[in-house]
Amino acid sequence: MRFNSRKLIIPGLLLLLFVALYLYRLPLLTVMGEYLYSPTPLKKADLIVALGGSRWRQREAVALIKRELAEYIAFVGGDVHESDADCLGLLRRQIIIVETPAYTTMEEALAVSRVVEERGFKSVIIITSWYHLRRAGLIFSKALDGKGVELMLHPSNHEPFDSKTWWHSYIGRKLIIMEYIGLGSFWVGYWL
């Protein structure tokens, strides 16, 4: 019986890959977190939009409007109530009520796109969680494509984990993995 070394090439390469992944897991995990964190420089805009899913996003949007980075603010998402603006100390003239309930980032982007088109806005600041910035930027860019709207992305920065150590917490692992699944879903849908 002859020994066939070719049969060992693929298992050997797989073993080397797993060893390399294990040895470089911390830098790889850090890069995964850093990739998702993609804010853009801020300047005065027509509209600030706080995406749904976190009251911290709304609070960050209010902080930016108090810094006079926009004249109008809108909250979108499935958990938005008209009274949210009153509770956060906004003036009625600053608030744009987005009537359409939105439960996904794409639904939020389409609702915001309609508001932007109706009002003739040319610049928008999107507030979301740091780990959601990359995908939100891609989705909003697609929804606002061809409308001549400048898009800026800003994190709410109130998460219990950060981009450099997200894997230390259960919620960090869960949300980052879900975000990468969402990114994959976006790219598959984008090319179909």
Image: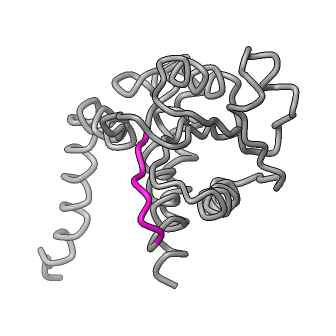
Residue toward you, 117 or 59: 117
Direction from residue 78 to residue 131 in the image, left or right: left
- The x, y position of residue 179, in whole percent, is 53, 47
Q: Which quadrant of the figure contains the N terminus?
A: bottom left
Direction from residue 47 to residue 95 in the image, left or right: right
Residue toward you, 171 or 21: 171
- Up/down of 184 relative to 47, above or below: below
The span picked out in magenta is 147-153
Residue toward you, 130 or 170: 130
* Numbered marks: total: 0
Residue 35 figure quarter: top left
Residue 162 in magenta stretch = no
What residue is shown at x 73% (from left), y 42% (from top)? 96
Direction from residue 5 to residue 90 in the image, left or right: right
What residue is shown at x 51% (from left), y 33% (from top)? 70
- The x, y position of residue 151, in whole percent, is 42, 51
Q: How is the image coloured?
A: one colour
Residue 55 figure quarter: top right
- Up/down of 160 relative to 52, above or below: above
What residue is shown at x 47% (from left), y 18% (from top)? 67
- The x, y position of residue 53, in whole percent, is 71, 36
What residue is shown at x 72% (from left), y 35% (from top)? 95
Direction from residue 123 to residue 71 in the image, left or right: right
- The x, y position of residue 97, in whole percent, is 78, 43
Residue toward you, 153 or 66: 66
Residue 149 in magenta stretch = yes
- Up/down of 67 relative to 191, above or below: above
